[in-house]
């Protein structure tokens, strides 16, 4: 019977070609959009993980509650021991310490007195440990506008805009006036090693990056840090694994009654990341739903047109005694073949287009150069679900369209058919 | 007879009203008397600031000289702050840090930042204007703090360039010294609270031995400013209130 249906489809191209093309186009768009959204949003998640959240982040409970204020007076203390515990509990995960800091940056004149100054905010990272991957992770080399990366702890990098505002450049001295974690005044001299472009207005106004050990010294944060970021061994964010890690860690080390005890948060649990990850999840459902509806309507129409074209055939089949239900079922089975064929073709083309976009669209030209905050290239990403996601709207929409169009069969009256056939 | 009784009643009433009016000084009078206690042409203070942070407390010792709108402070302890000097000349403030050999001018919104992590801002430290020059005051009620009767005085700034647009003072009725103060932003949000205790007499004036500041926007249990030694109307050598004193 199935062979009979297939023969019908192959021999009568007008029955199969157009619906297959419609399904293939729809499915290829679904696959392409899925890969593109997964790629672009995924890159944003990757960027956030690199720059701010890690795959998991450990802070003090009090620091986490006031994180918007970068409260180093609430920083984690005893970090050497915490790092040992983390390495023991979660082997293979890469742990990096970071300190967010703020203060007044002062540029001196030739007499050592204030010539220019402005408020700034920065991030202290590990520049000098041989095993540190922070420079690559933050894309610092590519973000340099003038000068170079720090080579000694007393060097600092300023955003290009901030440096221009202070009229300083590589080789010039600046003084950071800040507050130690115990509330004392901290005044520390630095030499500018280079300037960079962050790519976010707030950071470009007053951003800076320095070595974590020199900032520790300046802010009196020995054996203390603001944040410990963890990166999973695979390099990819795994929501289930990260959440399991945070649960395990918090159960063992975090005490709700002690505001200075550590707390681990997965990427999803930080800031707006929950929303971003949820959007990624919902988006698949939304694009599948939209394309399924759109294709069902198109295929319904095409089914109606096919029904008109095959009006005589249907009439004859009913007249010779074939059950209406059987005819209806045969049309739906035919449509399933069409749906599968269209989905295969559409998935192949969708993956083909997506693979072209995995190399990325270079939007660097529109962004006036590369920077840390945005990658200049937006890329699609082909994931496992891209291979089957198109079949859901492809097959269902075809079946749905045919099911709707085929309802007309039940409205045909046998008595009328003979008159039609005689005519 | 009725007429005599009526006149007597009126007389008693008038006496009571006028008596109560004399007993309650005007807001301006209270501010003048506070200024007479708290302000002086020149002053030398040796003090301790005990800063109670969220994790620990620390003590910063300093000595300072002030004359009109100018003042000079040198920090004596702890070791990290020792040798740091602050000079205020009119509306400008400089900090000298011996560890960096830098003289840094503090200006603009940075003046609202905390001094040494305390609950005092640079503006608080620099605020030396007589209250009566920059505020209008109204006595709103009487209240008792501990066992001391106080006037509750509400003050509104008459000029724009003040750190706090509104203040509420609880002023000792006998000694004319504030015992408690609330400092408000223009929006009505309370920014700081102070308590003045250990009131002692220095010549003809009363002055607090301890002022506890609490920045309402900051964690921690506040900052105690303890006066170890204070001298009013002292002779200040000219070089102290000059930039030469910074290095």
Image (cartoon, coloured by chain):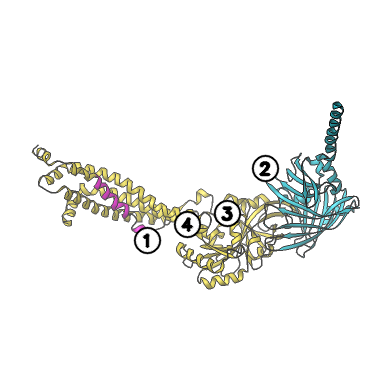
The location of residue B235, given as percent across then percent down, is 91, 52
Q: Quadrant of the C terminus of chain A?
A: top left
| Residue A148 seen in the current view | no
In whole angstroms, how far apart are the C-alphas of marks 2 and 4? 43 Å
Residue at numbered disc 4 = A43
Residues at marks 4 and 3 touching, judged by CB atoms closer than 8 Å: no
**On the same chain: label 2 and label 4?**
no
The location of residue A64, given as percent across then percent down, is 58, 59
Residue at numbered disc 2 = B187
Q: What are the residue bounds of the magenta stretch?
A: A385-404
Disc number lying in front (1 or 2): 2
Q: Tag 4 or tag 1, which sits nearer the N-term?
A: 4
Disc number lying in front (4 or 3): 4
Disc number lying in front (1 or 3): 1
Secondary element type, mark 3: loop
**On the same chain: label 4 and label 3?**
yes
Of all residues, the one furthest to the left in this rendering is A422
Residue at numbered disc 1 = A384
Disc number lying in front (2 or 4): 2
Residue at 26 percent of width and 42 percent of height: A301
| B55 on left or right of A131 | right
In whole angstroms, how far apart are the C-alphas of marks 3 and 2? 36 Å
| Residue A224 seen in the current view | yes
Residues at marks 2 and 4 touching, judged by CB atoms closer than 8 Å: no
For disc 4, the chain is: A
Q: Which chain is cyan?
A: B
In whole angstroms, how far apart are the C-alphas of marks 4 and 3? 17 Å
Residue at numbered disc 3 = A198
Q: Nearer the viewer, residue A7 or B168?
A: B168
């Amino acid at each position: 019977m199935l062979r009979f249906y297939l023969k019908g489809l192959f021999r009568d191209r007008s029955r199969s070609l157009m619906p297959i093309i419609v399904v293939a186009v729809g499915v290829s768009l679904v696959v392409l959009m899925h890969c593109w959204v997964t790629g672009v949003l995924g890159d944003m998640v990757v960027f956030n993980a690199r720059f701010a959240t890690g795959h998991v982040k450990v802070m003090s409970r009090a620091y986490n509650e006031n994180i918007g204020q970068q409260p180093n007076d609430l920083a984690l203390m005893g970090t050497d021991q915490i790092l040992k515990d983390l390495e023991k509990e979660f082997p293979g995960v890469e742990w990096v310490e970071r300190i967010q800091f703020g203060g007044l940056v002062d540029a001196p004149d030739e007499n050592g007195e204030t010539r220019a100054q402005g408020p700034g905010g920065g991030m202290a990272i590990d520049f000098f440990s041989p095993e540190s991957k922070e420079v690559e992770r933050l894309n610092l080399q590519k973000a340099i506008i003038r000068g170079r990366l720090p080579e000694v702890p007393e060097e600092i990098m300023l955003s290009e805009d901030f440096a221009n505002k202070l009229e300083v450049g590589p080789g010039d001295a600046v003084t950071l006036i800040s507050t130690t974690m115990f509330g004392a005044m901290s005044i520390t001299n630095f030499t500018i090693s280079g300037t960079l472009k962050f790519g976010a207005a707030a950071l470009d106004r007053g951003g800076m990056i320095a070595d974590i050990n020199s900032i520790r010294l300046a802010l009196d944060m020995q054996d203390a840090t603001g944040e410990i970021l963890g990166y999973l061994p695979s390099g990819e964010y795994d929501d289930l694994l990260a959440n399991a890690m945070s649960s395990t860690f918090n159960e063992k080390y975090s005490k709700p009654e002690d505001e200075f005890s550590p707390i681990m948060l997965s990427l999803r649990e930080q800031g707006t990341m929950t929303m971003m990850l949820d959007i990624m999840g919902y988006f698949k459902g939304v694009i599948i739903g939209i394309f399924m509806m759109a294709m069902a309507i198109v295929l319904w129409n095409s089914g109606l047109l096919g029904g008109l074209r095959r009006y005589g055939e249907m009439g004859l089949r009913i007249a010779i005694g074939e059950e209406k239900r059987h005819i209806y079922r045969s049309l739906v089975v035919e449509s399933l073949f069409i749906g599968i064929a269209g989905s295969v073709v559409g998935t192949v083309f969708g993956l083909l287009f997506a693979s072209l976009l995995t190399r990325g669209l270079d939007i660097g030209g529109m962004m006036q150069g590369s920077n840390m905050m945005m990658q200049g290239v937006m890329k699609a990403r082909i994931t496992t679900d891209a291979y089957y996601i198109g079949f859901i709207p492809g097959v269902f929409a075809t079946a749905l369209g045919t099911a709707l169009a085929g309802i007309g069969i039940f409205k045909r009256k046998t008595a009328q058919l003979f008159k039609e056939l005689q005519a | 007879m009725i007429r005599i009784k009526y006149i007597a009643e009126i007389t008693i009433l008038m006496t009571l009203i006028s008596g109560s009016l004399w007993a309650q000084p005007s807001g301006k009078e209270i501010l003048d008397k506070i200024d007479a206690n708290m302000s002086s042409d020149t002053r030398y203070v040796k003090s301790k600031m005990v800063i109670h942070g969220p994790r620990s407390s620390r003590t910063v010792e300093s000595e300072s000289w002030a004359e009109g709108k100018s003042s000079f402070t040198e920090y004596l302890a702890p070791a990290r702050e020792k040798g740091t000097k602050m000079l205020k000349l009119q509306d400008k403030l400089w900090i000298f840090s011996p560890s960096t050999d830098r003289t840094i001018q503090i200006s603009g919104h940075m003046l609202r930042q905390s001094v040494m992590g305390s609950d005092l801002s640079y503006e608080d430290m620099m605020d030396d204007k007589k209250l009566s020059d920059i505020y209008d005051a109204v006595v709103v009620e009487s209240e008792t703090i501990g066992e001391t009767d106080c006037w509750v005085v509400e003050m509104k700034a008459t000029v724009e360039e003040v750190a706090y647009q509104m203040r509420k003072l609880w002023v000792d009725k006998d000694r004319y010294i504030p015992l408690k103060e609330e400092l408000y932003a223009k929006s009505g949000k309370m920014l700081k609270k102070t308590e003045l205790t250990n009131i002692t007499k220095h010549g003809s004036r009363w002055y607090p031995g301890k002022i506890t500041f609490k920045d309402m926007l900051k964690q921690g249990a506040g900052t105690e400013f303890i006066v170890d030694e204070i001298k009013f109307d002292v002779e200040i050598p000219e070089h102290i209130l000059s930039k030469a004193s910074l290095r």
